[in-house]
Amino acid sequence: MVQSSVLGFPRMGVNRDLKKANEAYWGGKLSREDLLAEGKRLRLAHWKIQKDAGVDIIPSNDFAYYDQVLDHIQLFNAIPPRYAETKLEPIDEYFAMGRGHQKNGIDVPSLEMVKWFDSNYHYVKPTFQDGQTFKLASDPKPVREFNEAKAAGIVTRPVLLGPVSFLHLGKPDRGQSVDPISLLDKLVPVYVELLKQLKAAGAETVQIDEPILVFDLPQKSKDAFKPAYEKLVGAGLPNLVLATYFGDIVHNFDVLPAISNVYGLHVDLVRNPEQLGPVLEKLGPKQVLSAGVVDGRNIWKTNFQRAIDTVKQAIAKVGEERVIVATSSSLLHTPHTLTSEKKLPEEVYRWFSFASEKAVEVATIAKAITDAASVKAQLEENAKDVQSRATSARTNDPNVKKRQSEVTPEMHNRKSEFPKRIEAQKTHLKLPLFPTTTIGSFPQTKEIRIQRNKFTKGEITAQEYEKFLEKEMDEVIAIQNELDLDVLVHGEPERNDMVQYFGERMDGYVFTTHAWVQSYGSRCVRPPIVVGDISRRNNEPMTVKESKYAAAHSQRTMKGMLTGPITCLRWSFPRDDVHQSVQAQQLALALRDEVVDLEAAGIYCIQVDEPALREGLPLRSGKEREAYLNWAVDSFKLSTAGVEDSTQIHSHFCYSEFQDFFHAIAALDADVLSIENSKSDAKLLRVFEEKAYPRHIGPGVYDIHSPRVPSEEEIKTRIEEMLNNGLRPEQLWINPDCGLKTRQWPETKAALTNMVNAAKFFREKYANKA
């Protein structure tokens, strides 16, 4: 009999319960005991959802209060000394590593946070010491949560991040030189100890994730698998299902002999279905294949017939008893349940499947293999919904397709090269040395959220809401004037989300009310869904009114704020029936119109954010990666190239490692580039120095993901570091890491005051040298 399996389930809860509990705890409004109780309630609820869906193999230890990799940092006592020395309670130490801690004389910043592979989820990066040791926590979370589920009558399969991936995804701590992979011999015995405890608790099988097998790995990481799994498999230990996802593993087949002793192998057959044949050929004679046929990364209903055909192909090779039907990855990347959506068009509603529904899909596909008659009605209904989407008029707009056919190569290029443009911009904008700005958003207060909610529910009129927004913009502009910032923004009080806001003003999108997905920590996003061809609705401007209003209320340069085409696409749930390059070009044409409209309205500094450009990069080098970069860069340039030389185009990037696509960053031809930098230990700066980046750049001088306020001296040190790493005074902008939407006003004003003062210090210092 074919079994069904889910690799992981979303943790936030149906109403973002974990987000609310975490933030209440951080704000001192919820006790530690109540926070832990809420976590337990959510875990039990999620296990029950999967059990009721008919899933045979249910995961545990997929829950985390902040991040699953951070869980492992604490689990194995890989805690940097600066956090251990605080003597905080374990949960507070945990949150300090995730988000920083500045209270009661303790002042520690958070650990670095980076994208989880090519997803929009962010993990906390492990940092290791010279002489690093590991020790299993006294009450190991995976064992505790397995026992918790067992007490509720649910036998689960614990999920662990494998030792090779844990080390490979880490880095040396500041001032340290240790090679993380060299720590394998110290770490593996701790894993063995944990596996023994899980076995003693009754865990027959453990899912051990080694997702780095989809990367192009250095030989030392490949070589680490054999000594690791020789010790992790054996008598007295649970069976291991080694899970990979987000790509294929064919290029790492030379590693498979090293893991041939594991019980099973999971592969992602949604992202890379073509790897099935080669994987089946390499599978060990007794190994189980976990076939990831239900998409863990998108919201489209699974095509049952296609999934069943894939599973049957595997069964034909190895037999039913050696095949598991599974999600392609953890369902962490999908919303909780479709049943919360009451406002979607009926036709579109039937095209979607969220996490709870995907659990049912996995179970249904498994049943269809062994007893198709028992799920005949479900199979027929699924076939109708799949056909409905394929033939719907909602997906096609002839006018959009016509405009795409008329795009020429010349439309991707500015009128002049950067040296000529920057001279025109200096004359026009008259900005000082070390100009200061922010990345766009200012704190979204409780009052902003209340008024937006009232407007959405129809409790206040459009005129009343507009007056409220104008008042908010007036206050934000006044604060920026008082802070003496050089380039201002309107603060984005009208924007719920940097992608959703634009999607709501375009055709081709639909929107949800409860489809929240965790981005990092307690931060959740509600991605729009691309269902058809994209254009500005009625070709009306999307941002001009607010930017024009703000510009009229200040004598300083006002910056228009847009989200770029790649980020709009990557931070939406994209179509899976049209190539993403086609969708990106449609978005680029819509944004091109908006950029031109902003310029016509007197906005001569326009920021087109592309924080998601890096995350869209295919995980492996080669033709696929170069093809992506070509169409992604073209999309950005198509968006921004329609303006005069004197109009300054900015762009912003966050959580990015630029080494492997610096040429694409340069090719964007943005006049000013701001980047998240405060947690990167100057590694990003070295890249820009080595490559002699020719245009203007604003590496973030402080971390906005933490409430901690950096001192003026700390910011000065960072600016000095930038200048020492090859950046020239005349090209350097001073700005925070990212937007300030999630921060509170007191810390925002304090941090920006210190930032502006630091900029003025260097402005005076270099005044006669420029």
Image (cartoon, grey):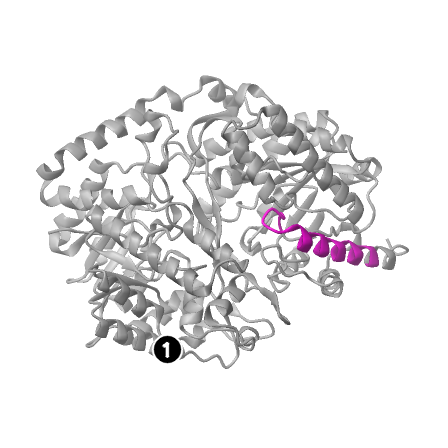
Query: What percent of the width, then of the height, locates residue 495?
Result: 58, 36
Q: Is residue 587 above or below residue 257?
A: above
- Residue at 66% across / 58% down in the picture? 702
Q: Is residue 326 visible?
A: no
- Residue at 38% across / 68% down in the picture? 164
In the image, taking residue 508 as reference, residue 552 lies left or right, namely: right
Query: Which residue carries the number 1 mark?
Result: 138
Residue count near mark 1 (Cα–Cα under 10 Å), binned few <14, some 14–19, many ≥20: few
Q: Which residues are magenta?
A: 738-761
- Residue at 26% across / 76% down in the picture? 196
Query: What percent of the width, then of the height, locates residue 102?
Result: 62, 65
Q: Amino acid at mark 1?
A: Ser
Q: Quadrant of residue 305?
A: top left
Q: How many marks?
A: 1
Answer whether residue 741 is magenta in the image.
Answer: yes
Instruction: Say which of 4 and 456 sits in front.
Output: 456
Q: Is residue 159 above or below residue 369?
A: below
Q: Quadrant of residue 230?
A: bottom left
Magenta stretch, overall SS: helix
Residue at the right extreme?
Answer: 768
